[in-house]
Amino acid sequence: MLIGLGKVIPGVSGSLIAVSLNVYEEAIEAIGHFFNDVKKNIYFLGSLGIGLVISIAFGSKILIYMLEFCYVPTMLLFIGFIIGIFPNLYHKIEKKNKKTIFLFLLPMLLVLMLPLFSTHMNFYPEKNMQSYIVIFGIGFLDAMTMVIPGISGTAIFILLGCYSFVLNLFSNLTSIEILTNFSYYCFFGIGLALGVILVSKIMSFLYNKYKQATYTIIMGFTCASVILLIVKVIQASDGIWEVLVGILLAIIGYFISICFGD
């Protein structure tokens, strides 16, 4: 459920929350090598999946309210949670050399450049094949950002102008709208499922063959995400008390993340 909340909040990556909860590698292995132990993987992925669906369906409504009325404390809580990943990731990177620095800085710079490509256009789907193809692509992109730690799907969607569409899609899972827009859910779900399977296999391969490099790249993505989030929170803050409360929540989130990482 925590991973689902991280997925919905703009700028926060659900997979980063999975890393901080120490379940990311197991989830990648379970998806990438599902048939090696079908019973175990169904139990594990099923438990995660139920939590994700419940969290996204109901948590998105709560988060919409929290982000509207107490944005800064809410975001700082999750920022603290993400920062708590750093010590665990750093210790997993055994070799620190010029190659490591390059692999850290490159993804960091790529993420920091994302705001330069922001668009003010919004995606409004219609019930035609062109919209269905776009929705399929959004689902596939969502899967990529869901599986690759440090890349926030919500941040990407905001830049591409389709965040409102995706958020409404999630928040309407418990309403009659799911029947009205059933075709949207089908194409989004197909793109999401294919993306999760393909990208999980790639990430599983990278973890097995290039673990140190993979951890370094994830560290770069994570640092960039935190920087962008902190800048956004500073711009949104309008009172010292909400910042102080937010810092307290960030410290709590940090130590919770540290406990899970251990």
Image (cartoon, rainbow, N blue to C red):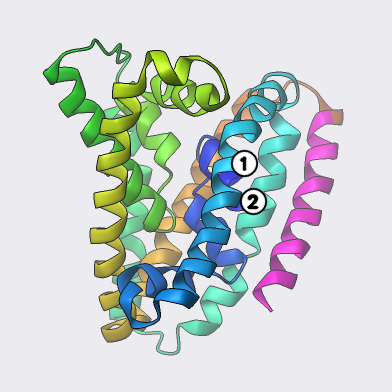
The number of discs equals 2
Describe residue 43's horizontal placement relative to residue 246 as left or right: left
Please give the label number shown on residue 224: none
Name the chief secondary structure element in magenta.
helix
The residue pinned by badge 1 equals 55
Residue closer to the observer: 186 or 152: 186
**What residue is shown at x 45% (from left), y 66% (from top)?**
219
Instruction: Report the span colored magenta.
Output: 242-262
Q: Is residue 148 above or below residue 93?
A: above
Whether residue 152 is in magenta: the answer is no
Q: Quadrant of residue 59?
A: top right
Percent position of residue 94, x then y: 45, 89
The residue pinned by badge 2 equals 2
Describe residue 153's horizontal placement relative to residue 213 as left or right: right
Indicate the quadrant containing the C terminus: top left, top right, bottom left or bottom right: bottom right
Percent position of residue 133, x then y: 16, 28
Whether residue 258 is in magenta: the answer is yes
Q: Residues within 10 Å of mark 1 (few under 14, many from 20)?
A: many
Res 25 visible: no
**What residue is shown at x 24% (from left), y 51% (from top)?**
194
Residue closer to the observer: 262 or 136: 136
The mark lying in front, picked from 1 and 2, is: 1
Percent position of residue 249, x then y: 80, 46
Q: Amino acid at mark 2?
A: Leu
Whether the residues at callouts 1 and 2 have beta carbons within 8 Å, the answer is yes
